[in-house]
Image (cartoon, rainbow, N blue to C red):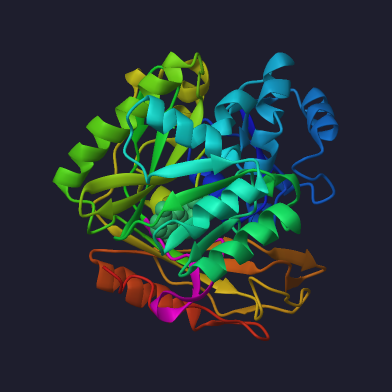
Amino acid sequence: MDVLIVGGGGREHAIAWALKKSPKVGKIYAVPGNAGIAEIGRCYPEISVTDFERILRFLKTHKDVGLTVVAPEEPLAGGLADLLGKNGHKVFGPVKAAAKLESSKSFAKEFMKKYEIPTAKYAVFDDYVNAVKYALSSKHPLVIKADGLAVGKGVYICENTKESKTAIDELMLDGKFGSSGGRVIVEEFLEGPEITVLAFSDGNVIVPMASSQDHKRAFDGDKGPNTGGMGAFSPSPVFTADAAKDFSENIMEKTLAGLKGEGIIFKGVIYFGLMLTRDGLKVIEYNARFGDPETQAVLPRLETDLFDIMSACADGTLSKIKIKWSGRTCVCVVLASGGYPGKFEKELPISIGGTDRDVMLFHAGTVKSGRRLLTNGGRVLGVTALGATMDAARNKAYKNAEKIGFENMYYRKDIGIKK
Ligand code: AMP
Ligand code: GLY
């Protein structure tokens, strides 16, 4: 059976790579895809992830596609899964009402409050004057967030009242994130290591994947601006058996029960962004999809057929599948364009010196021009290595990263060192 993947980042390459291992998967298509996915499937760079009509038309003319995987947040929040489902296509990825867990932070916060899922204390404001008044009288540091999608950039950690005022001004007066900032969430600042747990759900049951940790800041030592993620590893050493039990009982199962309580059938991946605070695990955010780069570090450890899991999620039969993970550690180092997450150049030639065994080179922002491989985004490649220990995996990833070059390339040197 053929599969269509909607998306074109490192996450989508990792998904394509894992699906390719399944004997049940025939051709892999991707819209728009990237140069890495094009090595194992067929990409359509001219079709964007939000061009719903063209995606639907594509499926009408490719009758052997039996499963569509919608990976990024934008088409999920816009209702692509609903549209494809209504037209009789099998989809891995939540419907719009379920994707609201990610697309509206106020919805997610109210959901957590209602179902007693631990999260930071908060208040929601639609009114500028009240938001400022509340923020100025709150204890700092204080966290201020845009309600809607803001490509991971709508969160301000404010050290003092001046910074809080600036954040609210940017979101509510200047419209920095458009309508996403019309409503703001003012939130208590939490401290502790951050852990990502992705979980598969078919709407009936929920099954966690192996834990991971992202590295959101651009530079070593968690310095510099927030990015989409500069590297990841799996498993997280701080996600102990006790933490896993706490997560399962107090967060994951309660989330599924809450979704059922709201009449929402979630078929896809729930991303739990967690913080291990002194008072236990708390949810920082939900996403309604695989994380990136976390997926690049998690899927290489998956020993069960991903196509079987995704099909079971779509069919509501996930309870029949036993999901197994390798005991090895996986480290993913993101190679980025100089200037990212700000302005950067594109179409710079990339040289790759070959990869060692147990190293996966997941493409993100890459494109082919004739036989040349060129940069085509902020995050360009994810050098991902499996090893018996964190040190082994990390050393292998960095050794292979050194064999790759393009002008102004930069990457963090401390992925897998932070505990
Ligand atoms: P989000 O987009 O909600 O994941 O937030 C982006 C990043 O901001 C998170 O990964 C955290 O590092 C940080 N953050 C968000 N909310 C809080 C909070 N309540 N306390 C401390 N840090 C936070
Ligand atoms: N790495 C963070 C995210 O995918 O949202």
Q: Quadrant of residue 233?
A: bottom left
- 48 relative to 221, above or below: above
Residue plotted at (62% across, 66% down): 166
Residue 128 among those drawn in magenta: no
* Residue 235 falls left or right of residue 74: left
Residue 301, image x, y percentages:
35, 50
Q: Quadrant of residue 124?
A: top right
Residue 390, image x, y percentages:
27, 67
Q: Quadrant of the C terminus?
A: bottom left
Q: Quadrant of the N terminus?
A: top right
Q: Nearer the viewer, residue 113 or 59?
A: 113
Residue 216 among those drawn in magenta: yes
Residue plotted at (51% across, 59% down): 136
Q: Nearer the viewer, residue 27 or 413?
A: 413
Q: Nearer the viewer, residue 380 or 183?
A: 183
Q: Quadrant of residue 65?
A: top right
* Residue 96 falls left or right of residue 107: right
Which stretch did the figure color magenta?
A: 213-229
Residue 213, image x, y percentages:
37, 58
- 65 relative to 389, above or below: above
